[in-house]
Structure formats: structure tokens, C-alpha cells
Amino acid sequence: MKEKKSLKGNSLNKFEGLYILLILILPFIYVKTIVDPVLIPRQILLSIFLLLTMLFLFFQKQKDGFQFSNKLIIAYCLLPILYCVSIFQSINILESYYTISKILLFSSFFILTTYLFVSGKIKFETILKALIVFSCFIVVSTILEVFKLRSTGVSVFKESNMYLITSTFGHKNLLSSAIFMCIPFLCAAFLSLNKSWKIAASINIFFAVLLIFMLQTRAVIAGMGLSFLITSFLSLFLFRGQKERKYIRMIGFGAIVVLLGFLFVAVKYSDKFSLLTKTESMRERVNIWHNTLEMIKEFPLTGVGAGNWQIHFPNYGLTRFYDVNFSISEGLTNFQRPHNDFLWVFSETGILGFIIYCSIFILSIFYLFKLIRHSSELNQKIIYLLFLFTILGYVFIALIDFPLERMEHQILLGLMLAFITSQYINTFENSLKKYDVKYFLILLAVTATFALWLGFNRFDGEKHSNKLLVAHQRGDWNKMISEGNKAINTFYNMDPFSIPIKWYIGVGQFTLGDIPSAKKSFEEAYQIHPYQVHVLNNYATCFEKEGNHNEAIKYFEEMFRISPKFSAGLVNLSGAYYNAGKFEEAYQTISKFNYDELNPQSQDFMKAILAKKMELMLQKNKYSVEERKRITDCMASDELILKTMKECQKQNMMFDEFVIKEVKK
């Protein structure tokens, strides 16, 4: 079967023009007026691109048929279907709509691009040239950012300062993985384009590798290393000719020199590469994965629903995070994804979604194996090998990060997989039945329109959320309520930090003394996110304010189950027990709270509860006159009670045990 030429040049057409615009505009899409400056704006860009491409295709007189029965295309069709089915499990359906819109966009982009490659409407070399410019922007903008930081006196190699380098990707890790995904395209350009483009590609490759090592993203560096080892091993079986193996050995030797050079520099200047040896984030991830696996055990078949991992995550406990990052157990830091795309898909769509998602990468690797074995051109085989290297690296990155969430990563992956699939179809499946693309174009129009509509709604919601967060920091409660009401719309009820907008509104109303309205807002926030500890805490507090102690205790206990070390929750739960006459439960709860001299509320609660505890101790009438006097002396003042509590916590003793020990001396 004859392989179709893919790297020949012709004049630019309208479809290639659209792809060039998408790739070149993509890194410039950055809006500071919303919470996440890139995620929603780039979704809007991709939606517009798909709509325009669909319109050009729809009104084209002659439409080529397409092999929709290709297995990788089927997998990409099934994935969004399973995400749609999972919606029946969702607690927050608006987050499901948002996640489904993204998956639909990614699938549509891949299938559309594959069709355009197969039909010859776009050429690989055109995409390569656009990606050279794209990567050039990333390299230049990152270097300029480094110089800008240095000019302000910031040492970028000093621990967390490296996280200030983001270019227009929101986070240094996402920047690093995006650079990594550009490398195979740059290498392909070096192997297949003319001299001027070869020079541009080689310069970009040099700086791309340099920046990856400088950014010290362990997922990317480890992914590159492991992928290199696996690809090197596989190349022994995939490249049989003596000339081919010699070429591969040269590439391998060069890569080893680069890796060894980096290791030498990293060891010699270990103070500047300290991010590589920090373990806190890895310990954090392990704890996140533990909760995610518990989630999967509970919902193995259906998953928890698209976009709802972030809702269920706290339900499996936050205690283990206390020693790693206490702000997580305090509910101040919330996770939106498990830093593992495979577990993410499994937890939200169930076992079938997980199998389909894994099959995307398994099939693409299988296609590359067959293409390498079939191809007779050395450069073409090396390009395929580079894509194999990148896909294996991407899989490793996706095991400890979240490229599935990001538009730019999925566009790069979609371009890569579309090229591989088109080559496979043209080489091995050209005789498959071709179906009319008309119905696909109609579905594409519906998908892109839905994603665009949702994108604009979420953009508006995030714009007001950003203002809401500023008002929250300033304590401008009326402004916070106003912006919160404006933020909520058809597709938006929770901010990017997994906090319901209604919670912010409730906080403002509560602070202004409007308890009935606050209670209603907290109740709505509870319906949106029933496992957020601050939502539970504030909702329960409203019941306590009304004197409904039993209902307050119910929600405080749920909060305590999720995060037993949540300080504000401990204090409030002990107060609810005390007010309900459950003095022993109040005492046991407040005893778990670490004494805090800067928390006047906790001190007030402690004084009342501990005084009551000593009063109950005296009622037991089993102490001598002298011992009873000593106990009474401990109650002589609030300061003495607090001093005694502080001392007993130092000795890791319960308050009553410590008092008995002291009076019996």
C-alpha cells in the first residue's frame, strides 16, 4: 500500500490560513480582568476557530468523504459521550456542562484536523512553520520575563521565585510542558523544511531544551528522561538498517550528552536547582491520589460526574494534608483536579471512560509502530519516532499533572494525533468506507456554538468573580454581594477555586447582619458544594444563631468529619455542643484545638467550656478539701484557666488529667 506524501509544498489555502491564525493568536490570548487569564478566553478562541472552519467546509461545493470508522476517531467520539452520560451523577451540573464543552471541543478539533490532513486541505509543513513561530513567541516571552524579573532584583533561581515565570500560560509547569510538546514539531521542521526554517527550528530547539531545564518542572524532565529510555529501547526493534541505527545512535548520544550536562550543572549548582529536590508537592499529590482512589472505589462504574471531582474530593478527608500544607485542611486551598489526568477521567466517567481515554494513547502508539515499520524514508521514520517519544512523555506528564485541562496542550496534542492518524489512514486504511461529513459538520456547529455560548457566560462570571475577590479582600461587603449576584448566570455558580459564589454573598450578608438572607445563600452554596468546610461552617453557624443547636451540630459534625483539624470548625462545634447542654462533647472537642493567643473567640469558648468542666469535676465529690481548694484556685480567673490549658497542651495531656495531676502533688 502506497504511503501518501505529507510534506510537499503548495500554495496556502483558507483552511491553512485559519490554522495559522489559531496557532499564532493562541499564546497572545491573555485577559487580566478574569480569575484565570487564559483558560476561558482560549476556549472561546477554539470555539470560534471550529465554527469558521465548519462554515468554510459546509459551503464548499465538493466535500470529500471520511473514514469515521478509524478506531482512534471512534475513541474520540466515545469519550465525550461518556462524559455526557456521567452528568446524571453530578452534584453541580453547571461544572459538568463546562467540562463536557471542553471535551467536545478537543474531540471535534482532533477529528476535524484529521479529516483536513487526510483530504489534503491542510499540509503538515504549513502547521510546522506556524508552530516554529508559536514556539519562538514562547521562548522570547519567557526569556524577556526572566530579564524583567532580574531587573527588579528578583533572583529567579531562588526557590519559589521560579514560579513567577509563566509567560502567558498561567503556571511555570504548564509553560514547561507546552514547550516540551513543541519539540517534536520543531525537530520535524528541521528535518523537512528548507534552510531558513531549519535554522529557525534549530535555534528554537536549543532554547526550548534550555528553558525546560531552567524551569525545573520535574514531571517534564522526568517524562523526557523516561520517554528517551523507552524510545531508545524500542528503536532497536523498529530501526533495522545499519544506516538507520547509526543515525539513531547519533541522536541518542547527543541526547545523553545534554542530559548528563544538565545533571552536572544541577549537582554543581544545587542551590539554584533546589526545586528538583523538594518533596512537599509530591507528598501533596500522593494524598490527592489517595482521595481520588477512594472516590473511584465508591463510584467505579459511573464516576462522580463530569467536572465534579472537585466537589467530591474533600468528602474523603483533609486530615492527611495538615502536616504537608495546613491551608488545605483549613479549606483555604482547594483542588480542582487530581494532578493525574487518567485518575481524573476514571473518577468522573467511570471504568469505561478510563478505558477509552487510555485507548487513545495505546492506539496512537500502535499507529506509530506500524508507520515506522512501513516507512522507507529515514527522515519520516525519525519524525514518527519523535512523536512516539513525545506521546510517551506526555503520558508521564499526565500522570502527575493536568494537561487535559488546558486548551493549548490539547491543541498541540490534537495536531500531533491528527497527523499520526491521517498518515495511518492514508497508508493502511485508505480502502475503508468513506462517510459523508455533512452530519459531522452539523454536530461540529452545534458543539462549537454551545461551547462559545458557555464560554462567554463563564467569561462574564469570572470577570465579576475577580471583582468579588478584590471586594472580599478589602472587606467591602456590599460590593461583594453586588458582584456575586452579577457573577451567577446560566453556566456559572462556582469560582475557579471551587468556592460557590453564593458562599461569598452569604458571608457579605452575614457580616452586615442579615442572617435570614445569609442562611438562604449558604443553603444554596451547600447544594452546589456540600463538602466545602467553610460552606458547612457558615451554614451551621446560621442555625446556631437561630438557636437551632441540633441542626447546627449536624452540619458542624459533617464539617468535623471532613477536616478534624479545621480550627474555626473545632471552636464552633464545641460552642454548639455547649449551648445544647452537651458539656462533655464540648470539652472533648475544644481539647483538640491548639491554644491560640491571637484568637479571642477560641479563648472565650475555652474559658466557658473549661470552667464548666471543672465545675462538673467538683460535683463528683471525690476530692479532699485541700484538692477541691486547688481546683477552685485554678478557676480563680480566666487567665489561670487559659494558662492551665496552654500548659497541659504542652505536655500533651487532657485538661482534666492535667488538673488532677497538679492538685494531687
Image (spheres, helix red, strand yellow):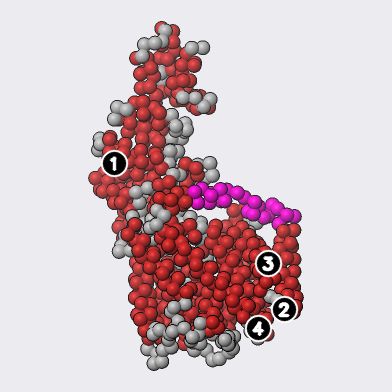
Q: Give x and y (percent) for residue 438.
A: 36, 84
Q: Earlier in the sequence, mark 3 or mark 2?
A: 3
Q: Give x and y (percent) for residue 341.
A: 49, 60
Asked whether 7 falls inside the magenta stretch, the response is: no
The Cα atoms of the two marked residues, 3 and 4, are separated by: 20 Å
Judge whether 625 appears above or below 216 on screen: above
Label 2, secondary structure: give it.
loop
The crowd level at tag 3 (other Cα within 10 Å; few <14, some 14-19, many 20+) is: few
Name the residue that disc number 3 marks.
Answer: 233
Which segment is the magenta one? 265-290
Judge whether 110 appears above or below 126 on screen: above
Q: Earlier in the sequence, mark 2 or mark 1?
A: 2
The Cα atoms of the two marked residues, 3 and 2, are separated by: 15 Å
Q: Nearer the viewer, mark 2 or mark 1?
A: 2
Name the residue that disc number 2 marks.
Answer: 241
Q: In the depicted view, which residue is nearer to us: 168 or 410?
A: 410
**Res 542 label:** 1
Q: Earlier in the sequence, mark 3 or mark 4?
A: 3
At 53% from the left and 49% from the top, the residue drawn is 286
Q: Earlier in the sequence, mark 3 or mark 1?
A: 3
Name the residue that disc number 4 marks.
Answer: 376
Give, as a three-letter code, the residue at label 2.
Answer: Gly
Q: Give x and y (percent) for residue 576.
A: 32, 33
